[in-house]
Amino acid sequence: MPVQPRVDLESLPDYVAGRTVPGAIKLSSNETPGGPLPSVARAIAEATTDLNRYPDPTVGKLAARLADKLDLPKEQIAVGCGSVALCHQLMHAMCAPGDDVVFAWRSFETYPIAAGIACANAIRVPLDATHTHDLDAMAEAITPRTRVVMVCNPNNPTGTANRRAELDAFLDKVPSDVLVVLDEAYREFVSDPEVPDGIEYVRTRDNVAVLRTFSKAYGLAGLRVGYFAGPKQVADALRKVYVPFSVNSLAQIAAMACLDAESELLARCETLVAERDRVRAELIDAGYDVPDSQANFVWLPLGDKAFEFSEHTLANKVVVRAFQPDGVRVTVSHPEENDLFLHAARSYRRSS
Ligand SMILES: *Cc1c(COP(=O)(O)O)cnc(C)c1O
């Protein structure tokens, strides 16, 4: 008999990354346009001389910087090889086989994969009619088997965000032994003041955690670094299931250089947010339905036309991300790239 990997893995979806097509503009992975800041690139270049050494396995300096920035004890921080890796660690750290993980759907595609690899049940709760997390339904989906609830705020791929009042009400309903993880990969693009900073909840509630990343607003998607802030015992467990040395030394150095240049990076986000609002307004003007986005992308709920739309923009040299049969996610970029996308979106309307 041939060797046989776990049979249940066959039923798990593969993680599908946004496509890269040579010669086309890539608006399919929510990356920030423009390379790293010169100061960050310099710090990375200087650190290459030490690449014969292992990285700090505790990621101590970066964790201390983050603790300082967030005004939390260092013990409540865990740094990971991207927040995708932290998601996997969370499932391993929290779930025994057969436990439940509750999340909205459609949401970030890592959740069902990470839950499945950890032998946990993925419980999907449909988004509401406005493409937003239905927090009442999510609270109702919690059972004695539930260990973790993922709340992607703002939600990937729809860009919608839940506000403070509804999150407060939701958290009041969640049992104290269920961990609520606010995935705030896009926090830096939130412009609605009613959307709370999840760190406030980490400070005031014992069962709330936040995931953040350097991949989006900080522009380090290629280096892989993200972090968790939450209950100390969960952070400890995440460190236990951490793959040793997986946050590499360049990632650690680059993330700290980003924190040094934070105001410059956040100014870039403001420009991007203005572009996001312009892109949305122009799409609505062209006849599209586009939910309010608090992230660096917009969502077109095109249903089963999603794939067709993405093929049309591709023919116009713009790569977007189709989630057949729900809709299309389009990353906001520089104005010239956004204009090329808008041009393709208008011509699709005329041709369909
Ligand atoms: C992009 C993204 C992440 C970040 O992933 P990294 O592994 O840190 O690159 C996490 N959560 C969501 C919802 C995302 O969209």
Image (tube, rainbow, N blue to C red):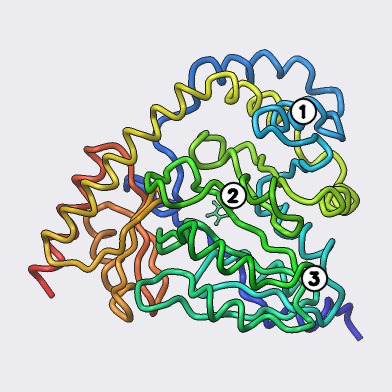
Return the residue found at the far left: 350
Instruction: Return the x and y of residue 188 as percentages of the image width and height.
Output: 47, 40
The quarter of the image holding the C terminus is bottom left
Q: Which residue is mark 2?
A: 198
Mark 3 or mark 1: whose residue is earlier in sequence? 1
Instruction: Return the x and y of residue 144 as percentages of the image width and height.
Output: 79, 83
The quarter of the image holding the N terminus is bottom right
Q: Which residue is mark 3?
A: 118
Q: Which residue is mark 1?
A: 64
- Helix, strand or loop status at disc 2: helix
Mark 2 or mark 3: whose residue is earlier in sequence? 3
Give the numbered dot on residue 218: none
- State whether residue 152 is above or below residue 116: above
Disc 2 versus disc 3: nearer the observer? 2
Marks 2 and 3, how far apart in space? 25 Å
Mark 2 burial class by Cα count in 10 Å: few <14, some 14-19, many 20+: many
What residue is drawn where x is 72% and y is 71%? 115
